[in-house]
Amino acid sequence: MNEISQNYDLDLAALPVSLEGKRIAIVHDQLYTIGGAEKVLKTICDLFPDADVFALFSTLNDQERQHLMGNRMPKTTFLQKAPFVKKLRKLYFAMMPLAIEQLDLSKYDVVLSSSYLVAKGILSHPTQTHICYMHSPMRYAWDHQTSYIQSMRSFFGLRRFFARLLLHYMRGWDVRSNNGIDVLIVNSRFIAKRVSKAYRRQSFVLHPPVDLSEFTVKEDVQREPDLFVTMSRITEGKRIDLLVDAFRQLPQCRLEIIGDGPLLNHVARNAPKNVTFYGRLETTQAVEKIRKASGFVYAAEEDFGIAPVEAQACGTPVIALGRGGTLETVVGSESPDDIAPTGTFFKEQSPTEIAQAVKRFQDLRGKFSSAACRENAEQFASPLFVKRLIEMIDISVKGVDFSTAGLPNMERQPEWHVSQSTSKQIAYHS
């Protein structure tokens, strides 16, 4: 039997017999950084330390690789030898479907894919069980296509034309390739809706694991009422630029930004004096800053969004965009009286909306408690993910129909929902 890691306080006697003697392969898209998807990959690798790991390419250094998968070396595709593959990976996008299909997984009984691009498109045969944990369908091929193409610099429109042609082809491949998945697991209801739109198939919601061991509440820390913090990679999609412009309108408040990324220098260049960039910090340093802040501000539309959960684990309430995964991880400020809120939302990604939300948050400060924030965060802790994932793998390998297996589907998942009207946000528990 594949040895299951004991890092998650599991009862080893209760592990599924269905996995005894099974050869397991783990497939991930790209290994060039450690982000949210790679944290899920790490948990899966910890669970199955004997499984082989596959990816399109890997540019991780030894320390990063060992952190994710121990002493294993990932098996890669011909893209591994492509020139400047990390920097130019977007230029190799059209080759990725072909590359992933060249991986030979014929000797494995169970394939676990962790996919946000093409990993789900591996070729499997009828006797294999393919379980896909999908972080998102290809964002730029589906609902993000318009914004992606509009952001391109194009010579007489030629680049945009060829981009549309490529994405048209990729959507066709994306739909066809999902037919090889036996069980599709997604990281949020938000992504379940994307999956339904793109593939017209059922998926099962399992929120990703969040390691809360270092993100803890410290009651003796004095919060600064006018201090706010955010933690994120500084990329286009994270919209750190909006936070900077919002706090330009709030000179009485301070914003501390934790994280680095390709747009760091560009965003920091014209930042006002009340905004401070700290770059990438060690976890202990980041936790100290989150604990001292009055609130955690987040402008990205996330598939799930781990950082807001980590902030709540520190007892810090969240000010976030009222779209995407944060609607499932943050309890809105206008929740019913018997439900403790853990943050508030703004409707649009604009500096003025964010600034107004910060002011509203300050007026509502008395409604938030560190205990409520921590309690809400704990439902996303890693051990719960591990327990549910093992259940799902067990059911899948046995060939049991999920609809009769007693697992909650995306409509019945017993977690926080948030319903929005034009005037307020309402959080409730199903």
Image: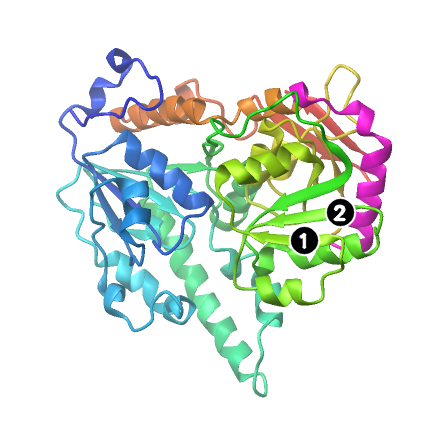
Q: Residue at x 65, y 63 (%)?
A: 267
Report the side of 148 relative to 292 (left or right).
left
Residue 248 vertical position relative to residue 37 in the rendered view, above or below: below
Residue 32 vertical position relative to residue 394 in the rendered view, above or below: below
Mark number, residue 276: 1
Structural crowding at the residue carrying mark 1, measured as other residues with C-alpha within 10 Å and reported as few (<14), some (14–19) or many (≥20): some
| Along the line of sight, the residue nearer the viewer: 208 or 314 | 314
Q: Quadrant of the C terminus?
A: top right
Residue 12 vertical position relative to residue 4 in the rendered view, above or below: above
Which residue corresponds to mark 2?
Answer: 254
Q: What are the residue bounds of the magenta stretch?
A: 349-372
Label 1 sits on what residue type?
Thr
Mark number, residue 324: none
Q: Residue at x 54, y 22 (%)?
A: 378
Q: Residue at x 48, y 32 (%)?
A: 210
Whether the magenta-drawn stretch holds residue 75 is answered as no
Residue 227 vertical position relative to residue 300 in the rendered view, above or below: above
Q: Are marks 2 and 1 in contact (CB under 8 Å)?
A: yes
Percent coordinates x, y for residue 308 in the rendering? 60, 37
